[in-house]
Amino acid sequence: MIVGIPKEIKNNENRVGIVPAGVKELVKNEHEVIIQKNAGVGSGISNEEYEAAGAKIIESVEEVWSQAEMIMKVKEPMPQEFDFIKSDHIIFTYFHFASEEKLTEEMIKRGSTCVAYETVYDGKGLPLLRPMSEVAGKMASLMGGYYLSIPRGGRGILITGVTGVKPAKVVVIGGGTVGRSAAKVAASMGADVVILQRKGKTFDYLEKVLDKEHPEHFDFSLVESTEENILKELKQTDIAVGAVLLIGAKAPKLVTREMIKQMKPGSVIVDVAIDQGGMFETSRPTSHSDPVYVEENVLHYCVTNMPGAFARTSTFALTAATLPYAVKLANGGIEGIKSDSALLSGLNIFKGKITNKGVAEAFKMEYIDPMKLLP
């Protein structure tokens, strides 16, 4: 199969779909890899490194899309790329369809096979979402602390505190990979950390982590996530991190405008769930070039591609996760999807039909069982 890697064009997106080691693995499996010129520069990877690994460097993005049978990206296709997409393309990337109706409609129209990193489920979790969730979660506390400074519009609270002065309070809504990563970084900086989580397996796990003898122990308070408790904690917080995920579906709007009105002026919201539509009622997507806005006297950081800011770390972490699935997909094509339950769960759109329930429900569109469509 010819695997194409175009240069990412989303605002300040410096990641790239594969690293040289990934190219070597695909070539070893007898696939051809074509990469748009300078696609890896933002992640510190030169054209020469890709060529040494066995890739062919292609001058234009049009050529990459026209020659490739399978496209590997990091972020969803941008409007400028829509006309390059063909019905026989397999596109393997983060799509986050549930928050992008226009993108969903375009992919249905183009008839391509869309396999979304974020819904690939291996029976235990989301292996292709996990590394970027970790990066975004850790970034959430760093960015929240940065925007608390007065020059950035914040309250002037130092997240770490100093001798005799309390640190910032950080409230994390959701205790999955994003939430735990945000909480760990905040706690390591000395912040007063609260995780709000619904009762269930994740809550039980977090309770165990509170034990000082637990190997993953870190300091935080654990509170059951209810409407009453969310409001209570938000009233007292300096940084609120949104970290709730529903696989393939829109994020639930757990924080209303009325709740945000009761937050401290100059406090900061970091809505990591913005890729799936955001979980704060006042959230709207922002970019790295224009990352924040103020609403109800609260700063909102809602960048939809947070890990793109730390591209080299993110690119290498992402390829380590995606490569085994990329090889399976390139080796087997449509049959590979059909025979692999994880890839099948990643199939969101096939031959103009929605094959993911969460996406279909988000837009009240028809869902088709993928096994009824796959040849």
Image (tube, grey):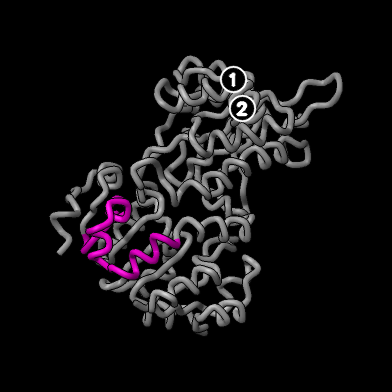
From the viewer's side, name the closer residue of 339 and 365: 339
Q: Quadrant of residue 316?
A: bottom right
Residue range highlighted in magenta: 323-352
Our reading of the magenta stretch's main secondary structure is helix
Q: Which residue is drawn at 42% across and 44% down?
A: 276
Q: In which quarter of the image is residue 299?
A: top right
Label for residue 10? none
Residue 337 part of the magenta segment: yes
Q: Where is residue 211 in the image (x, y as percent from the top left)?
A: 59, 20
Q: Which of marks 1 and 2 is nearer the N terminus?
A: 1
Which kind of residue does numbered mark 2 sit on?
A: His
Quarter placement of the N terminus: bottom left
Q: Residue at x 38, y 60 (%)?
A: 325
Tell me: residue 291, above or below residue 238.
below
From the viewer's side, name the closer residue of 131 and 281: 131
On the image, numbered disc 1 is attached to which residue? 211
Residue contact between numbered discs 1 and 2, judged by CB atoms under 8 Å: yes
Relative side of 184 to 256, left or right: right
The answer to whether residue 156 is seen in the rendering is no
Q: Where is residue 131 in the image (x, y as percent from the top left)?
A: 52, 49
Residue 209 part of the magenta segment: no
On the image, numbered disc 2 is attached to which residue? 217
Q: Which residue is drawn at 77% across and 36% down?
A: 150
Which kind of residue does numbered mark 1 sit on?
A: Asp
